[in-house]
Image: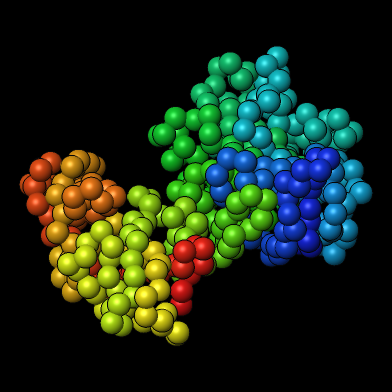
Amino acid sequence: MSGLKLENVRKSYGAVEVIRGVDLEIAPKEFVVFVGPSGCGKSTLLRMIAGLEEISAGDLLIGEKRMNDVDASKRGIAMVFQTYALYPHMTVAQNMGFALKYAGVKKKEIERQVNEAARILELDQLLHRRPKDLSGGQRQRVAIGRAIVRHPDVFLFDEPLSNLDAELRVQMRIEIARLHRELQSTIIYVTHDQVEAMTLADKIVVMRNGIIEQAGTPLTLYDDPDNIFVAGFIGSPKMNFLPAEIRGGRLVLHEHEDRQIPLPKLHTPPPEGTRLMAGVRPEHFTADGAAALDLKIEIIENLGGETYAYARQGKSDVLTIATGGARHLRPGDRLEARFSPDSVLLFDLEGARLR
């Protein structure tokens, strides 16, 4: 399998620049997920890699070969789209083997490759069915099988699970992860769902407004985000952010003036009077934390294994608190939400992380 490199890649539509200088290196056999809000440029970047959108500036290399001007059909790439795009009059086997037939591959070789892909995707018993006789998950597996038989250097997935219901999405995430382990292929996968990104990726690339905000392993982005956007985007439920200020070498939370907590460990502590944002993840509230907030519960969300309390002090912003499955809590109850000062992440008012 080949790796892939993007060097200062840009995309413009007239005077509007939608991809604004992307540098990224993807190793062979790596599973990379592009994630970000709608309109951030992740699907456009994927289509540029596929050859479906022209690169306005910069270079795309697959292996060591520059691909900017190479036709999409000759880039060694197979793409799985959000819509299945199966031929309704063809069987599963015919859909999977169509590209090989079009390329002039012999019938017996097509049959061998289709059967191998069907085995990997557990479609063996469905090869003679037509798309109308399949479930959504089965149709998506056929679309993936159509890509597998081409033995591409790189697989591209453009939000392939967004049309499936919640249960099927979980099942297909497992299938795609298993497929990656079995094929040892290079995969680039686009999604707006950060849970998909966290569960599938070797590397997550977080995008916003046509640039990469941060790239790294899922746990690196979760534990050590570079800025407030990445901190808020990665993690479910999202991180709580509280306006704060440095006073007397301690952290004072504006909406909780009676609470002064020790500063988290920083290489360069901010000067007195610095205004900033303090971030605490819902799951970092624990019974033995040294710092505490006195809150009133507004809503309880019982999920079985976990219970989330949505609470605030006065007219402050609502905070999300993971309570460890405490089922006795009710709306209107007082809650002492305890946390460790060392779990707090600090950001300046421009959103950059303070370390």
Asked if one can make out residue 53 in the rendered structure from this viewpoint, the answer is no
Q: Quadrant of residue 82?
A: top right
- Residue 1 image position (x, y, % from top left): 74, 59
Instruction: Decide: is 353 above or below 309.
Output: below
Picture colour scheme: rainbow
- Residue 128 image position (x, y, % from top left): 63, 21
Please state which of residues 35 and 29 is positioned toward the viewer in this rendering: 35
Please state which of residues 310 and 114 is positioned toward the viewer in this rendering: 310
Please state which of residues 128 and 146 is positioned toward the viewer in this rendering: 146
Q: Please identify the residue farthest to the right as the structure is shown.
A: 69
Q: Quadrant of residue 13?
A: top right
- Residue 250 image position (x, y, % from top left): 28, 78
In the picture, measured across the screen, residue 90 lies left or right of residue 227, that is right
In the picture, measured across the screen, residue 301 lies left or right of residue 217, that is left
Please state which of residues 76 and 68 is positioned toward the viewer in this rendering: 68
Q: Please identify the residue farthest to the front as the structure is shown.
A: 273
In the picture, measured across the screen, residue 173 lies left or right of residue 100, that is left
- Residue 243 image position (x, y, % from top left): 35, 61
**Residue visible at 23% across and 48% down in the picture:** 315
Instruction: Decide: is 223 above or below 40.
Output: below
Asked if one can make out residue 252 in the rendered structure from this viewpoint, the answer is yes
**Residue visible at 59% across and 60% down in the picture:** 213
Number of disc labels: 0
Q: Please identify the residue farthest to the bottom as the structure is shown.
A: 267
In the picture, measured across the screen, residue 305 lies left or right of residue 152, that is left
**Residue visible at 80% across and 33% down in the picture:** 99
**Residue visible at 39% across and 64% down in the picture:** 277
Instruction: Decide: is 147 above or below 285.
Output: above
